[in-house]
Structure formats: C-alpha cells, structure tokens
Amino acid sequence: MIKRIHINQHKIRSNKKNNKEEQVITVKTSKNNYYADEVEVKGSCKVIYKPNKPLSCGARVWIETSDEVIMKDHDLITKIL
C-alpha cells in the first residue's frame, strides 16, 4: 500500500494562532488519513514535488513509500502502517 506523508501548513498556522499542539503530519493511504507528531519510514521512500498536480489536500510536496511507516503522537501512542 502506498503511503503519502506531508505537513499540514494550515494546522501549523492554526496551532500558532490558537496556542495549540494539534498533529501536523499527515499520512495518507488509499483508505484513510492518519495524523502524527513523528513519522519514521522503515525502508525506501522518495520526496515528490508536483506544483501543477498537488494531492487532493493541496500538498505540492510529499514523501511517498510502500514500506512500513511508524507514527507516534504526543501521548507516545504508536501506530504502524
């Protein structure tokens, strides 16, 4: 399964404005979006820049991998995809 990892700039701005710490890293799969504070790719990945063909969320730069991804949130809960 392909996973696309990107940073949500809108969340960063919102966190700064509202003094919050909501998760800003998004991991997209064909089925779901997952959110994290930390992501580790266990294997190969590539960084993609497509200014004229962004993801549906608007991201123009992302990391793409088919390998295992480990995500952690601020409560140190770990999810593996």
Image (tube, rainbow, N blue to C red):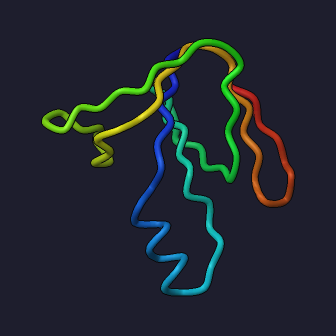
**Residue drawn at (63%, 14%), measured in percent from left and top?**
67
For the C terminus, the image quarter is top right
For the N terminus, the image quarter is top right
Hey, which residue is sitting farthest bottom in the picture? 18
Q: Nearer the viewer, residue 68 or 49?
A: 49
Hey, which residue is sitting farthest right in the picture? 76
Q: Nearer the viewer, residue 2 or 42?
A: 42
Q: How many marks?
A: 0
Tell me residue 32's x, y (percent). 52, 37
**Residue drawn at (53%, 18%), measured in percent from left and top?**
45
Does residue 38 appear to the left or right of 56 in the view shown? Answer: right
Against 43, residue 56 (above or below) is: below
Tell me residue 65's x, y (percent). 53, 19
Tell me residue 55's x, y (percent). 29, 38
Against 40, residue 26 (above or below) is: below
**Residue drawn at (28%, 41%), measured in percent from left and top?**
60
Against 68, residue 26 (above or below) is: below
**Residue drawn at (35%, 38%), measured in percent from left and top?**
61
